[in-house]
Amino acid sequence: MADLASKASHWTPLFQTVATYDRRWIANDLMAGLSAAAVQIPTAVACAQLAGLSPITGLYTCILPLVAYVLFGSSRQLMVGPDSATCAMLAATLAPLATAGDQRYAELSAAVAVVAAIACFIGRVMRLGFIADFLSEPILQAFSTASL
């Protein structure tokens, strides 16, 4: 049974996090979660509109990736969700293919999200995270600053 739990924590770090979680952290974690939600929800709605999608799409992009990250992510400090840089790139990519606001635009947007998720999953399976070590600190800081 321990071997099964070890394999499960390899694919889903949530098991290890729950096993090592200190209950004294719960009040601070709840406050951090509420604070993050207070910022993330309006940002997600605005980013969806920036990308040419409906505001409800912003709520989905705020919640669903977070659920996936809870299951498969390993960092307790990372915030997951849409950002203005990603939305601008999505809008620029889809503009020649469809008109913002129509059904085809939303379908293409979903297809881009699925392809990105598959690429991330393949990178996780192939353990390609080491590639980020080749990026210099100024480049990482510039990307982080630009994505706000």
Image: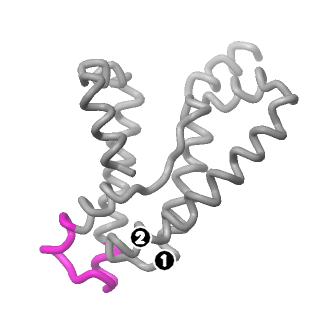
Q: Residues within 10 Å of mark 2 (few under 14, many from 20)?
A: many
Residue, x 18% and y 74% (percent of image)? Answer: 95
Name the one closer to the observer, 104 or 43: 43
Q: Is residue 120 above or below residue 148?
A: above
How far across and down, in percent of the image, does residue 72 sit? 55, 36
Name the one closer to the observer, 111 or 61: 61
Q: Quadrant of residue 14?
A: top right
Q: Which residue is mark 1?
A: 55
The residue segment tinted magenta is: 92-107
How far across and down, in percent of the image, does residue 69 sit? 55, 42
Q: Does 70 sit left or right of 90 as displayed?
A: right
Q: Quadrant of residue 47?
A: bottom left
Q: Quadrant of residue 15?
A: top right
Whether 122 is among the magenta residues is no
Q: Which mark is residue 110?
A: none
Q: Secondary structure at mark 1?
A: helix
Q: Secondary structure at mark 2?
A: helix
Residue, x 71% and y 21% (percent of image)? Answer: 5
Specify the amino acid type for callout 1.
Pro
Residue, x 31% and y 86% (percent of image)? Answer: 102
Disc 2 and disc 1: Cα gap in Å? 6 Å
Specify the amino acid type for callout 2.
Ala
